Amino acid sequence: MLAWAYMAAEGRIDMRLNREGLKDREAWRKAGYYVPTYDREKLAENTRRNPEWIHFGAGNIFRAFQANLMQQLIEEGKSTTGLIVAEGFDYEIIEKMNRPHDDYSILVTLKSSGEIEKTVIGSIVESLILDSENEREFSRLKEIFTAKSLKMASFTITEKGYSLVDGKGNMLPAVKSDMENGFENPKSYLGKVCALIYERYLHGRLPLALVSMDNCSHNGDKLKAAVTAFAKAWTKSGIAEEGFMDYVNDSSRLSFPWSMIDKITPRPDPKVEALLAADNIEDLEKIVTDKNTWAAPFVNAEECQYLVIEDAFPNGRPKLEDAGVIFTTRETVDKVEKMKVCTCLNPLHTTLAVFGCLLGYELISEEMKNPALRRLVERIGYQEGLPVVVNPGILDPKKFIDEVVNTRIPNPFMPDTPQRIATDTSQKLPIRFGETIKAYEASKELSLDTLEGIPFVFAGWLRYLMGIDDNGNAFTPSPDPMLEVLMPLLADIKLGESCDVRTVITPILQRADIFGTDITQSVLGDKVVSFFTEMIKKPGAVAELLNKKFGC
């Protein structure tokens, strides 16, 4: 891995994270930073003339993972082009983070051993705003998308970024407008992306891989469904040529590989910011944008990382396998993704997120010191999830959970919060727990009656939706597209007051889009009702029931 171990700064001199400031490489090295050795100006020029990889989503996971992978290839002489990043949701990231620092960033890797590695990332050589109203920016994006050299457009725009409808199932206004008005001045994120894809189609139906690297099930299909919806609407109305639909459906021209990504990249941590400030690096303050994005010129991340991608690239691809990426079949990606998302990591994270918010924890790692929470997590992973996991062959499920439970989640140097992980929980439950429930329903050997941890989490999440913590204090739930639909249904439930719980929560439990199945049709519904009833009896009831069920 291209990084240097942390050392105390020797001889304090002012250092700036930009092109000019990094000319004094020796000062950075003495301060314990790995500094790129390649000719970045030449790299940028090569990239401008022959772009190969553009990424949408300028967030932490991209800067900590994909950008670092590309840097490894560049340093090893296995790529002569760098990365281009485009941001289509929060333009402030580009304006206030990327450009003032000439697209450089710092990756701080926090190891469970206590070792800290600091790496200057320089593989991002161009940053753009995905704004159809900005002629200069959008023209450059069109130029990139019509380049024959372009091999891959990848995405980390979150799972909800691929949705064309709101929490009530209504088409989003910007999407509806783009569907009707076409590709000339699109407003929605994916409408703008599809306009660029259409531009590539017009320039000779050039091949390209569109790779979702978001942490969601069958992510390639979600991206393809959105692109297909726009193509269908535009060709049906005559806005686009009929051949555009064929282009989107032709996997030899346009592919939508599945992928599985795994790396924890929390919000910028004040302690990491202080560590870098102690090295006398200037202008590293983090910001919260108007769209509530936490951003900084640095990103803190764990050392563990996995990226498995279906090898379907009609125009070739970077040699990312030399940087640790696993390329395989769609079937194997599916197995790995289900192993991780449905059993071995994501459900454990969601469990800790829900109860961390209720019990007042500020760090995920601190929760693992609670014996009852640890046992709940272990039960969901080892006892309830592992029996339905199909071994993908390239990663061992048991060893994966071992690493998660014993190394990754308890890592005290990882400043990840329950509140961050709790974001969009309604979108995560059907995959993170629903798939396990379906596997039990389909099994002749396994019984839903043995599940205790999963319905306990469901009850905890309903308790979370009350917006009242276990001490009886109000809190603001993390952003979730279903909050405005679900929270009013629980508004009449009061902590410490009796009510007809079953009548109130049954309409929620029946929603297969949330839980993966109508859980009122099995014993799970009764268990959730029972657990939730106990959790609302009085302040402290959640902690009391947690210890009763899963304590020593």
Image: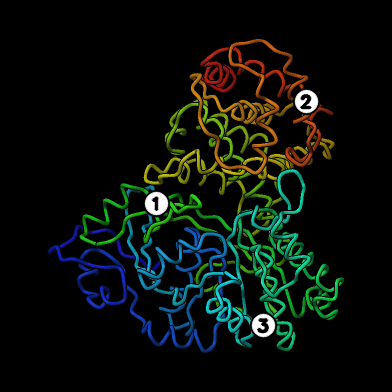
Left or right relative to 213: residue 217: right
Question: Of circles 1 and 3, which is in front?
Answer: 1
Q: Nearer the viewer, residue 51 or 373?
A: 51
Task: Report the amino acid beneath label 1.
Answer: Pro
- Callout 2: SS: helix
Left or right relative to 432: residue 93: left
Residue at 49% in and 84% down: 47
Q: Up-down: is 141 above or below 485?
A: below
- Callout 1: SS: loop
Crowding near pointer 2: few (<14 within 10 Å), some, many (20+)? Answer: some
Residue occupying the far left of the picture: 11
Q: Nearer the viewer, residue 483 or 348?
A: 483
- Callout 3: SS: loop
**How far is mark 1 from mark 3, CA to CA?**
36 Å
Crowding near pointer 1: few (<14 within 10 Å), some, many (20+)? Answer: many
Residue 177's spot in the image, x, y percent?
73, 62
Which is more N-terminal, label 2 or label 3?
3
Task: Report the amino acid beneath label 3.
Answer: Asn
**How far is mark 2 from mark 1, CA to CA?**
39 Å
Residue at 46% in and 61% down: 92
Task: Report the amino acid beneath label 2.
Answer: Thr
Residue 412's spot in the image, x, y percent?
38, 42
For label 3, the residue is: 315
Among the 4 quarters of the image, the one containing residue 148: bottom right
The colour scheme applied to this rendered structure is rainbow
For label 1, the residue is: 268
